[in-house]
Amino acid sequence: MPRRIAIDPAKCSPSVQHALHRLREAGVRFDLKTVHQIKVDDLNFYPAKGTIFRDGDAGALDQDGLDAFIRLVRPAPRARHGDADDAFSTTEF
């Protein structure tokens, strides 16, 4: 999803501006849907209250706050060849 901003961030609250800054730093692609809502894939974050909603869910997630949102949406780090977590690495004997 491309980073699209249809809303002028200068018109947003300081909490939204701070969230946008942190998301950019974390390399997260997002949409600023309204002056109150940031969307990443199927997750929606409302910085003023710190609530996180998933599309289609009846209520907010148990996790809340900007740090939790970033943990949920941050791109997974790419494994380097030879890392223990690299599912495709093999050891030859």
Image: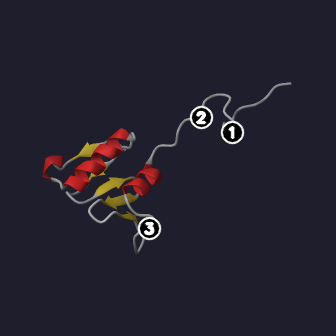
Pinpoint residue 11: horizontal percent, then vertical percent: 13, 52
Q: Secondary structure at mark 2?
A: loop
Name the amino acid, label 1. Answer: Ala
Residue at 20%, 53% in the rendered image = 14
Q: In this rendering, would 73 be left or right of 8?
A: right
Q: Which residue is mark 3?
A: 61
- Position of the N terminus, as image quadrant, is top left
Name the amino acid, label 2. Answer: Ala
Q: In this rendering, would 12 be left or right of 41?
A: left
Pinpoint residue 46: horizontal percent, then vertical percent: 30, 61
Q: Which residue is mark 2?
A: 79
- Position of the C terminus, as image quadrant, is top right
Residue at 23%, 46% in the rendered image = 5
Residue 2 seen by the camera: no
Residues packed near mark 3 inside 10 Å, few (<14), some (14 to 19) or many (20 plus): few
Which of marks 3 and 1 precedes in the sequence? 3
Could you tell me how far apart the alpha carbons at marks 2 and 3 are, in whole angstroms? 29 Å
Please tell me whether residue 72 is drawn above or below residue 90 in the rendered image: below
Q: Are marks 2 and 3 in contact (CB under 8 Å)?
A: no
Residue at 41%, 51% in the rendered image = 70
Residue at 40%, 58% in the rendered image = 42
